[in-house]
């Protein structure tokens, strides 16, 4: 899955991993690949045994990361196909997806209805060229903007700050960010998380308008406004991949 031709499969201390030589690498680097395999990137001339020793020294870390990966993969697969009868989380609760086709001339619409169990109904126009995933993402971004703005409006006065702008993005590695000019941005994927998690990320970024940097004063401010901050951070670490996979079609284990 996505392996570069020059990658070599190796094993160290019982841990299978992928070794990649890169002219840009200055030192050894270890990440988990998209399929959960450890990938070690080394400078071109580094000997193999150096990479083996590195993997061995990081064995516990790899074990923890793999366990987290597998748990998320299982939850993701359990949600089933992204389509009619499948499910997607909204505010941390699974919602059943209902898809139906509209007659020509009607416009695509997405409706959130919890009357008969949490569900999201997607009515698709035959003229709509987008995939279900694209339709859902556009709608979720819209929902995220509303949810985030409501939270910001509720929390900003409590923290004594006033952001100049709030935008919704899809940052790969961050759930939110704050600029020194007072601009906040948030990942639309937060709309998938439990309300306490979205609230924590909003508090976190608002607090940056008062204290820049992750200093003890910053964390004291965050924890005073959000007593569940640590639990929310842990939740994000344990669900990060799952959130990024949310609109992807689950694939069978290879
Ligand atoms: Zn921060």
Image: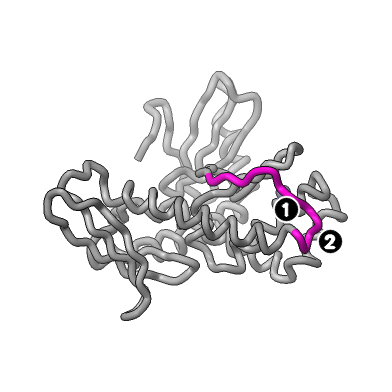
CA separation in Å, label 2 and label 1: 13 Å
Residue range in magenta is 157-168
Element type at marker 2?
helix
Task: Indicate the position of residue 31 as horizontal and vertical percent values.
Answer: 55, 42
Q: Is residue 100 left or right of residue 238?
A: left
Q: Residue at x 60, y 25 (%)?
A: 25
* Label tally: 2
Foreground residue, 92 or 49? 92
Task: Indicate the position of residue 9 as horizontal and vertical percent values.
Answer: 42, 38
Residue 158 lies in what quarter of the image? bottom right
Tell me if mark 1 has few (under 14), some (14-19) or many (20+) residues whose alpha carbon lies within 10 angstroms of its own: many
Q: Residue at x 16, y 56 (%)?
A: 102
Foreground residue, 67 or 103? 103
Sequence order check: which comes first, mark 2 or mark 1?
A: 1
Q: Are marks 2 and 1 in contact (CB under 8 Å)?
A: no
User: In the drawing, what numbered circle is on residue 220?
Assistant: 2
119 versus 139 height, above or below: below
Task: Indicate the position of residue 63 as horizontal and vertical percent values.
Answer: 55, 57
Tell me if mark 2 has few (under 14), some (14-19) or many (20+) residues whose alpha carbon lies within 10 angstroms of its own: few
User: In the drawing, what numbered circle is on residue 131?
Assistant: none
Foreground residue, 241 or 56? 241
Q: In this view, does 122 lie to the left or right of 152?
A: left
Q: Nearer the viewer, mark 2 or mark 1?
A: 1
The quarter of the picture where the N terminus appears is top left
Q: Which residue is drawn at 59% across and 61% down?
A: 150
Residue 159 located within the stretch drawn in magenta:
yes
Task: Indicate the position of residue 101 as horizontal and vertical percent values.
Answer: 16, 57
The residue wearing badge 1 is: 206
């Amino acid at each position: 899955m996505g392996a570069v031709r020059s990658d070599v499969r190796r094993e160290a201390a019982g841990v299978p991993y992928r070794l990649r030589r890169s002219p840009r690498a200055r030192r050894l680097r270890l990440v988990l690949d998209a399929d959960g395999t450890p990938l070690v990137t080394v400078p071109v001339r580094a000997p193999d045994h150096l990479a083996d020793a590195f993997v061995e020294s990081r064995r516990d870390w790899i074990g923890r990361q793999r366990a987290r990966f597998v748990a998320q993969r299982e939850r993701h697969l359990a949600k089933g196909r992204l389509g009619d009868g499948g499910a997607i989380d909204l505010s941390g609760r699974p919602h059943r997806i209902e898809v139906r086709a509209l007659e020509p001339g009607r416009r695509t619409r997405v409706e959130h209805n919890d009357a008969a169990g949490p569900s999201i109904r997607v009515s698709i126009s035959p003229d709509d060229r987008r995939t279900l995933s694209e339709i859902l993402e556009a709608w979720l971004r819209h929902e995220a903007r509303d949810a985030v703005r409501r939270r910001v409006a509720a929390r900003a006065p409590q923290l004594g700050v006033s952001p100049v702008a709030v935008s919704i993005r899809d940052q790969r590695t961050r759930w939110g960010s704050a600029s020194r000019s007072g601009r906040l941005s948030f990942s639309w994927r937060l709309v998938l998380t439990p309300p306490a998690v979205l609230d924590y990320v909003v508090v976190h970024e608002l607090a940056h308008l008062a204290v820049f940097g992750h200093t003890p004063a910053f964390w004291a401010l965050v924890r005073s406004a959000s007593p569940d901050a640590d639990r929310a951070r842990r939740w994000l670490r344990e669900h990060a991949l799952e959130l990024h996979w949310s609109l992807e079609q689950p694939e069978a284990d290879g």
